[in-house]
Image (spheres, rainbow, N blue to C red):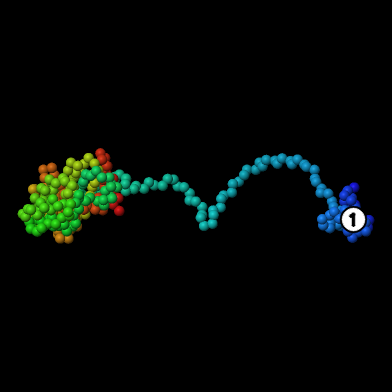
Amino acid sequence: MGFKQCSSCKGYYNANRGGCINPECTACDRARTANLISTPVIPKAKPRRPVTKPWVKPKPKRPDTKPSIKKKPRPASGIGTPPKLAGPSPVVVLKSDTMAESELQRSDIGYHNIYRGDTRTPSQLTAYDGFTAWVELSKEQARNVIRRSQGQNFNLKLPKEAKRLEDAFNRNMNLNLLTLGRQIKLEKAGDTFHVSTDPTEGCGGYASGYIYAMKFKTLYLIDKAGNVSTGSLKDVRGINPKLVLDTPSLSNANIIGLAIPGQAGVEVAFLTKIPMKNIYKYRIPQGQGWNYLESE
């Protein structure tokens, strides 16, 4: 039966469930409305059933035969397009790479060059900030060792680690640079206050480990008579050592050493520290070429 229109109020009701449910209608089904929780809303028009279209199988799409055109990507705002690749970048030679022979020769021109054999690696040497003696002297202490070896009689004061050498100097009142040079040649103990170097790559027979090269722009050679020259260190001859200073005067020198001649060649012993800024290249054990050494 479905929905019917009431003859009295003209409203619609579901005839399958009973009569009119309009409580104001004279033909209202009172028993039915009493069972409803709330007063029903009488529809003004007969509700329609939803219309469902029959299912139709979709037709397959025809393949697109047109060639696809890729759009060029637009750069993001403020970034710009990436640069075109122009081949590999040039190789930058770092200061730890092997030095070319021509560059090696140019780097030595106009300098006093000396060498030292040492078992420490470049990184270990950098941690020490250069070459220092077993017992490091201050510049004033190094000057006093030279003055004491030039015949000036005074009580020499050295660090406590060099007490043995301090006592030896103070017991001998008539010293000279020859005495000092011989003492340096003999000393191998761990309380010495000098750093041994060589003006040749032979390093005085200590070339089995690392070989470090040092250069100084100006070094003055001063003999026992006080004559000053700037000649080559390996050309020192005779039996008397010569002072090696970075200034013509001992009183304001910062680099203080002694060039000691001998049958096996010249040994250059420094009483002051050799800083890293003067150590510029090295050769690995059993190596052939030289390598840069960073000193900054």
Q: Secondary structure at mark 1?
A: helix
- Residue 203: x percent and y percent? 19, 44
Residue drawn at x 67%, y 40% is 63
- Residue 247 visible in image: no
Return the residue found at the far left.
Answer: 174
Residue 38 location, quadrant: bottom right
What residue appears at the point 9 percent right and 54 percent down from the top-left corner?
170
Whole-percent x, y for residue 251 in the image: 15, 60
Which of the two residues, 24 or 138, is positioned nearer the viewer here?
A: 24
* Residue 1 x, y percent position in the rendering: 90, 47
Q: Is residue 98 above or below residue 177?
A: above
Picture quarter containing residue 289?
A: top left
- Relative vertical location of residue 278 with respect to residue 201 in this rendering, above or below: below
Q: Position of residue 183 (x, y in %)?
A: 11, 48
- Residue drawn at x 18%, y 41% is 205
Q: Nearer the viewer, residue 53 or 61?
A: 53
Q: Is residue 149 left or right of residue 279?
A: left
Based on the displayed image, in which of its 4 quarters is residue 220 positioned?
bottom left
Picture residue at 89% right of the left edge, 51% below the top: 18
- Drawn side of residue 73 relative to residue 287, left or right: right
* Three-letter code, disc 1: Arg
User: On the rendered structure, is 54 left or right of 16?
Assistant: left
Residue 167 appears in the figure: yes
Q: Identify the residue position indicated by label 1 in the image.
A: 30
Residue extending furthest top? 286
> Depth check: 89 or 278 in front?
278
The crowding category of the residue bearing disc 1, from other C-alpha atoms within 10 Å (few below 14, some 14 to 19, many at least 20), is some
